[in-house]
Amino acid sequence: MNEEKWTDAVQNITMPQGMAEEVYHNCMNDYNRKSSKPTFNKWIASAAALLLFVVVFSSVTGFNVYAGVEEEVVIFFDEGINPEKVEEIQEQIKRFPDVISVKYVDSEEAWEDFAKKYLDEELMSGFTENPLKDSSNFKLKIKRDTDLKKLESQIQALDGVRKVNIKGE
Amino acid sequence: MNKDNNLEQTIQEYGNIIYRTSYVMVGNEHDAQDIMQETFIRYMKKAPVFREKEHEKAWLLTVVHNLCIDMLRFRKRHLYVNLDEVDTVSRAQDENKVIKAILLLPAKYKMVLLLYYVEGFKVSEISRMIRISESAVKKRMQRGRELLRVRMEDV
């Protein structure tokens, strides 16, 4: 095969017209939105709006706003599990009434977090493969008053789940 | 240099590289733009400092690789590869055929081929960038070349 032929073709791919500007503006908007520091007046206005929302929401729905949520459960999968199975587990977990949200953390992210906390650049360069390649996991946000033992056994019973870590146990 | 200027300059310098890598990896313009955008947002937030220009390019393409892999995973089974869209990517008919053949390769082969042949990284650099061993990089390149040869005969 002539490498030049396909590399030239790929090198000739360029951004459609206007995309660079669009990306630039979207990035700046995202950056400014997240880094903007609210003024004192904005803080007051936000706090008042939040309080009003809480009062109205609580009175209308009877929802206990003080129950809160906490991230307490991490679920690891069987080795070599396929993405379809991971999604199936996610769907099953979402159906548990005490689970508020499920976040997928892939093994790369798990390794990066670990490396950031415990390794310097030189040590990291010694790894050519991800040593935590079987550490993809789900992090759950669950209701504060959840029966953790019950939830743990329910999740542990799911096909494809290797381990369930309950925070603080 | 402020964030505005820095970002603008970085997009000018690396925009096409990031776009074409993302495009070949995910197979459609819309997702490629999303990946490009997210890459530059991370660049702004992390504001990494590089000793050499090549390190900057390697950093950006490593982020692109990770984002593409994430997108692949979350897109359930396979990515949405829009072959009709290819005709708008390049004006030359024979180039479009070649690009279509590349788009249909599995992602793990595409990335090493792109980094090696198109962006000019060494095997050892690719190994560090996508965190696989050098022998795995070589194997993927060999397998990728074989598959591409077959695909190019079909198109």
Image (cartoon, rainbow, N blue to C red):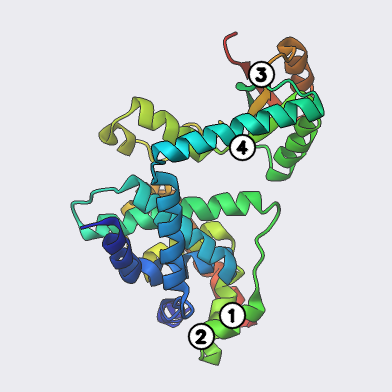
Residue at 38 percent of width and 64 percent of height = B116
Whether discs 4 and 3 lie on one chain: the answer is yes
Residue at 33 percent of width and 71 percent of height = B12
Which callout, 4 or 3, points at the residue further toward the start of the chain?
A: 3
In the image, residue A157 above or below residue B53: above
Circle 3: residue type? Tyr
Residue at 57 percent of width and 63 percent of height = B31
Q: Residues within 10 Å of mark 4 (few under 14, many from 20)?
A: some
Where's the C terminus of chain A, which quadrant?
A: top right
Q: Which residue is mark 3?
A: A66
Question: At which x and y percent is residue B80?
Answer: 67, 65
Q: Which residue is mark 4?
A: A104
**Disc 4, SS:** strand
- Whether pointer 3 and pointer 2 mark residues with C-beta atoms closer than 8 Å, the reply is no
Count of residue discs: 4
For residue A159, side relative to residue B14 (left or right): right
Circle 1: residue type? Val
**What chain is tagged by disc 1?**
B
Name of the residue lying farthest toward the left: B51
Question: At which x and y percent is residue B61?
Answer: 39, 58
Question: At which x and y percent is residue A50?
Answer: 60, 33
Q: CA distance from mark 3 to mark 1?
A: 53 Å
Q: CA distance from mark 1 to mark 2?
A: 7 Å
Q: CA distance from mark 4 to mark 3?
A: 27 Å
Residue at 38 percent of width and 69 percent of height = B15
Comparing labels 4 and 3, the label whose residue is closer to the camera: 3
Whether discs 1 and 4 lie on one chain: the answer is no
Q: Which residue is mark 1?
A: B86
Q: CA distance from mark 3 to mark 2?
A: 57 Å
For residue B138, side relative to residue A160 (left or right): left
In the image, residue B11 above or below residue A119: below
**What chain is tagged by disc 3?**
A
